[in-house]
Amino acid sequence: MRLSDATVVIRPRTTWEAMDLGVLMSQRHRRLLMTSWAIVTLPIFALLSAIFWDSPSLAVFIFWWLKPAFDRLPLYILSKSLFGETPTLNQALREWPRLLKPQLLASLTWRRLSLSRSFVMPVVQLEGLHGHAREQRLQVLLQRNAGAAQWLTIIGVHLESALWIGLMVLFYLLLPQQIELDWSWQTLITAAVQDWRWLEHLTNAFYALVLIIWEPIYVACGFSLYLNRRTVLEAWDIELVFRRLRQRLSTTALTLLLATILWVPGAQHVWAAEPVITPDSPRLLDQPLTSQGSKDSIKALLEQPPFKNKETVTRYRFGEEKTDTKTADDSKTPEWLKALLALLDSPRFGFLATLIEVLLWGAVIGGVGVLIWRYRDWLQAFVSRRPALKSKVARPLPQQAFGLDLNRETLPDDIAASAESLWQTDPRAALGLLYRALLSHLLHDHHMALKTADTEGEVLQRVEQLQQPALLAFSKTLTGHWQNMAYGHRLPPAHLQQELCDGWRTLFGPGAAH
Amino acid sequence: MSEQIEPGSPTHVAQQRQRASQLAQAVRGELRKAVIGQDTVIDDVLTALIAGGHVLLEGVPGLGKTLLVRALAKCFGGEFARIQFTPDLMPSDVTGHAVYDLNTEQFKLRKGPLFTNLLLADEINRAPAKTQAALLEAMQERQVTLEGRALPIAQPFMVLATQNPIEQEGTYPLPEAELDRFMLKVRMDYPDAEQELNMVRQVSRSTRADMLDVQPLRTVLQAKDVLALQRIASDLALDDQVLDYAIRLARATRTWPGLILGAGPRASIALVRCARARALLRGGEFVIPDDIKGCALAVLRHRVRIAPELDIEGLNVDQVLGQLLDQVPAPRL
């Protein structure tokens, strides 16, 4: 690398200027860059489209993902042409497989989504660094220009999409209206049947075309950013100046050097004899411009406009005018008025003033109160919220339903046992007892609001709301048999006795009364 | 406790009852296919069919009143006629009239659309009272007197009338005597959100505009089947307590403070018959108080008149009757 051979002017630039340089570089070699990019990418894109014909999005995604691999070719061309060795198309293409080798996997996997991709690419490809060395290098490079590199990528993403969409819109605009109508009609009719894949692949192709234009520019911008960073870090511009100096002065340098060496010892002697000079030393104070004088003039300068801005503001102020008005009005105000005012100001009338104040406030508050009272209905209806419902009035629990006495005291202690004993003689009474006990249980233990008007079906619906499957199942069985007995006049089967009594015991405990 | 003794062999009766229940439930299933989201209304209409009564359907336009009746006619193999009631409809347009035949030089009777099994009286309150009165005899006595001759109407005979509650313009309210002859007055309300969604999806998917074309219905019921259902329903066991409950409900309307006009004995009869029909529809073997309570609202709502002060307060008949049902004690044993 010979900096003196560089085809661009090497000097420290701002980041945006550096990117601009990249654009110019890619412009100079646009034909080579774009042709080589197209030759490499388009066949691959065609291949991907053919392979993933059924999933166009996947094809374009893979193509997009492979971009770092394609990027190496433009970078190679740019780096060669920087020092005047622009390769031909053939050379560049032949070189590409070799370029792919170093760290391809890394750049296609975990480094793929790096935002400063184009900026750090030269580190791997041109410097050939890897591992720890690469990381150190990146650390140094990214200290200053990481932000710009990331912005470059972000702008690139937007530009790419804008161009892509623009190309699609252009395509759409160029469609003859008749064809467009026909298409929309066909999409309507044969939405499910027709194969519209080719359209999606066409859209993908637009992306590939956009990349031909944009991607070399992106690579070039990253490359120029990288160059700029190195120029700053390694002071290439100063090196270049020195090189030019050396070229020009290589003949006279030797004599100059000799002369310097001969002259320097004497000069050192002279410097050593000089006393130390301070601002207060008499030699300096004797000068036409003394230290004091310069200090004063500096102070005077500092008082002047660029350093101090004095403004004069004129405005009215009320605080201090009191005395003036009083004296001015004295002649016009009649004496009696002044006397009256003085009298009223006296503490004697203080309580009267307080009284009047209280009365006035009272009138205001009372007026508001009267207004609220007058329009209370309107306010209730339109302003305030509905009055909160009064808390549920605790209703006395009904002691009777369906002609059954539900009071706990009237029930036997062991209901299941009593029912069993009753079953033989009076099955109806036994079933009635069980049903009565169930209702009593619902009433007292579950606080169910049973009304006398509730039918058996409605009681069952309320049991359903309790969400206790066991209780519900038992209640259903019992209610069914009770209805059979009471309204259908059907005697319950014998085995039912045991079933119901067992059900009762499992649900409410062996000796439970309720 | 008294054992109910049924005529015929008990197992045979039970089988018949089971078959009748299945038949009724099949009709219900078919109707639910056509009329989505109106299950209670379908139940009420079937109740009236089994109980041998007439139904007055009330609802805002577009709820499927006419659709329900047409669906019922499709499921029902008997004759179906429809009269669109208009302000200029004459009684003879309903019952029929005598026409002079020039060939035979004699008067011939031409029977009106009333002579059918299932009669849809669409928008019944659009015709004046005299035309509405043409239905009175047919509905109660199931016969029509034409030219001095009483002509019987085929059994079963059921009138399904629809009316619109909102429109007052150009309508004639039904007289009490006419209202009383309807066994049930069924209110159709808007379907649930889910059911409406379901219905709209089904109908809009089809290219046909009519719901009946969307769901072709089977004819599951013949005229004689209906008669059999009615007979089986009327044989269903009814406990005295349940009967008493029905009577107490009807009687309570007469003394209820919120009602100025109570229901007559016809209401009690209708209550019991409806309860029997509901029991059959439910698949039950006897009537329980729930059957009475379930149809009480439909039976009573058009037979009572609410007190004006409650009307002004914004209460409607259904709310007052709901309070009544909440107060009248269920059967005691």
Image: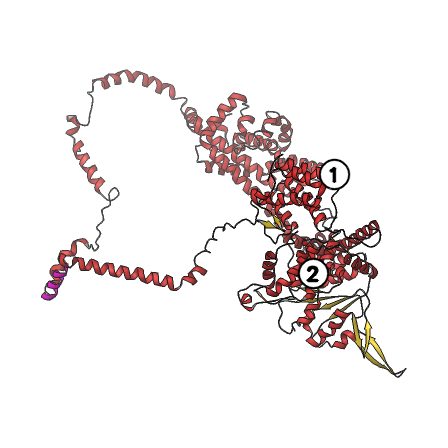
Left or right: residue B268 versus residue A119 is right
From where the camera sits, is residue B70 visible? yes
**B219 or A479, nearer to the observer:** A479
Up the image or down, A67 lies above or below B233; here it is above
Circle count: 2
Three-letter amino acid code of the residue under disc 1: His
Q: x, y percentage for residue A27?
A: 55, 39
Report whether A286 appears left or right of A428: left
Outermost residue toward the right? B104
The verdict on residue A336 being magenta is yes
Q: Is residue B178 left or right of residue A331?
A: right
Q: Position of residue B120 (x, y in %)?
A: 74, 67
Q: Residue at x 55, y 65 (%)?
A: B310
Corner quadrant of residue A492: top right
Read off the magenta span: A335-346
Say the numbered circle drawn on residue A495.
Answer: 1
Q: Are marks 2 and 1 on the same chain?
A: no
Q: Which chain letter goes with mark 1?
A: A
Whether A248 is drawn above or below B330: the answer is: above
In the rendering, at what x and y percent does residue A66 appear?
62, 33
Q: Which residue is mark 2?
A: B271
Between the residue at mark 2 and the residue at mark 1, the CA separation in whole angstroms equals: 36 Å
User: Local crowd at mark 2 within 10 Å, few (<14), some, or many (≥20)?
Assistant: many
